[in-house]
Image: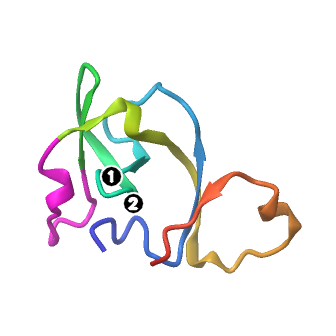
Amino acid sequence: MSMFPELTHEDLVVTWSTRKIREKDLIVFVSENNQKLVKMVSKIEGSQINVVGTNPLLGSTLTSKPISSEAIIGKVVFTWKGQRVRGKFLESLSFHSFRR
């Protein structure tokens, strides 16, 4: 829950595939152990990007080292709270679920 209250495991996120990433953006990336994660960009130095969660009470070992810009899937452009949205419309979108 390192992204709580911004996001929960029940939320659905829509991403936009872009390399135009800025500090404070929420991004989806593939971690070293092949998990898709959402974090907030805290610092950008060349092709290395530092990320953090939005919950100040929880830390994450995944945020202790920078990620490569090549690991980024996209920038979060929309979220649905509670993922109660169903139907053919969502099936046609490109999105990533973060349920465990």
Is residue 58 left or right of 73 when viewed as pictured?
left
The residue pinned by badge 2 equals 35
* Magenta stretch, main secondary structure class: loop
Secondary structure found at label 1: loop
Distance between mark 1 and mark 2 Cα atoms: 5 Å
Asked if the stretch drawn in magenta spans residue 21, the answer is: no
Give the SS element for disc 2. loop
Chain part drawn in magenta: 52-65
The image quadrant that residue 7 belongs to is bottom left
CB-based contact (under 8 Å), mark 1 and mark 2: yes
**Residue 98 x/y as whole percent:** 49, 68
Q: What amino acid does circle 1 point to?
A: Ser
Residue placed at 19% from the left, 52% from the top?
63
Q: Does the magenta stretch include residue 60?
A: yes
- Out of 50 and 34, give the one closest to the viewer: 34
Position in image of residue 68 (x %, y %): 30, 33
Q: Is 74 situated above or below 14?
A: above
Q: Which residue is drawn at 39% across and 60% down?
A: 35
Could you classify mark 1 by the number of other residues whose Cα lies within 10 Å: few (under 14), some (14-19), or many (20 or more)? Answer: some
Position of 37 compared to 99: left or right? left
Q: Quadrant of the C terminus?
A: bottom left
Q: Is residue 71 above or below residue 39?
A: above
In which image quadrant can residue 36 be found? bottom left
In the picture of the structure, the residue carrying the numbered disc 1 is 31
Quadrant position of the N terminus in the picture: bottom left
The spot of residue 4 in percent (x, y) is 34, 71
Amino acid type, label 2: Gln
